[in-house]
Image (tube, rainbow, N blue to C red):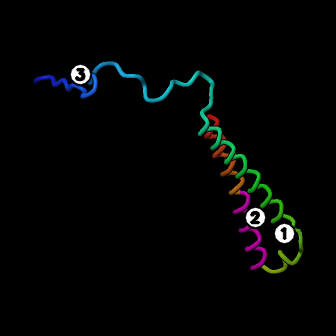
């Protein structure tokens, strides 16, 4: 098996020589700007989900939301979905932090 060395056009040096890394190595403990942006989005999603849950709980405080079996099942499903959205938002933030 033969080894091929290709020359670059501009410098005439073999292209297999040491190159600078494409990205700067991040210092330990430093968070990238993209990661910071994703964390801010996740935090905003938590705030939005909690606000939606709070608004829904105010709606569900009305006895009419529980007046029939159908209304009770519908209210319970809406509340479960809203709580799940809050839990998923927290899980997303935790995944970004770890």
Residue bearing the label numbered 3: 12
Q: Nearer the viewer, residue 2 or 54?
A: 2
Alpha carbons under labels 3 and 1: distance apart: 75 Å
Measuring 72% from the left and 50% from the top, which residue is drawn there?
Answer: 44
Measuring 21% from the left and 25% from the top, which residue is drawn there?
Answer: 7
Residue bearing the label numbered 2: 79
Q: Quadrant of the C terminus?
A: top right
The nearer-to-camera label among 2 and 3 is: 3
Q: Nearer the viewer, residue 39 or 90?
A: 39
Secondary structure that dominates the magenta span: helix
Pointer 1 and pointer 2: residues touching (CB < 8 Å)? yes
Residue 34, image x, y percentages: 59, 39
Residue 65, image x, y percentages: 83, 75
Residue 59, image x, y percentages: 85, 70
Residue bearing the label numbered 1: 60
- In the rendered structure, which disc, 2 or 3, sits on the residue that comes first in sequence? 3
> Which range is magenta?
70-83
How packed mark 3 is, by other alpha carbons closer than 10 Å (few <14, some 14-19, many 20 or more), is few
In this view, 32 is above or below 55: above
How packed mark 1 is, by other alpha carbons closer than 10 Å (few <14, some 14-19, many 20 or more), is some
The nearer-to-camera label among 3 and 1 is: 3
Alpha carbons under labels 2 and 3: distance apart: 68 Å
Q: Secondary structure at mark 2?
A: helix
In this view, 92 is above or below 75: above
Alpha carbons under labels 1 and 2: distance apart: 8 Å
Q: Nearer the viewer, residue 64 or 96?
A: 96
- Residue 24 is marked as none
- In the rendered structure, which disc, 1 or 2, sits on the residue that comes first in sequence? 1
How packed mark 2 is, by other alpha carbons closer than 10 Å (few <14, some 14-19, many 20 or more), is some
Measuring 66% from the left and 51% from the top, which residue is drawn there?
Answer: 88
């Amino acid at each position: 098996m033969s080894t091929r060395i290709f020359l670059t056009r501009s410098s005439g040096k073999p292209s297999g020589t040491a190159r600078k890394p494409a990205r700067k190595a991040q210092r330990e403990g430093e968070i990238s700007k993209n990661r910071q942006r994703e964390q801010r989005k996740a935090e905003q999603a938590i705030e939005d989900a909690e606000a939606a849950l709070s608004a829904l709980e105010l709606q569900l405080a009305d006895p009419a939301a529980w007046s029939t079996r159908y209304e009770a099942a519908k209210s319970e499903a809406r509340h479960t979905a809203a709580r799940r959205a809050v839990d998923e938002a927290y899980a997303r933030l935790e995944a970004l932090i770890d």
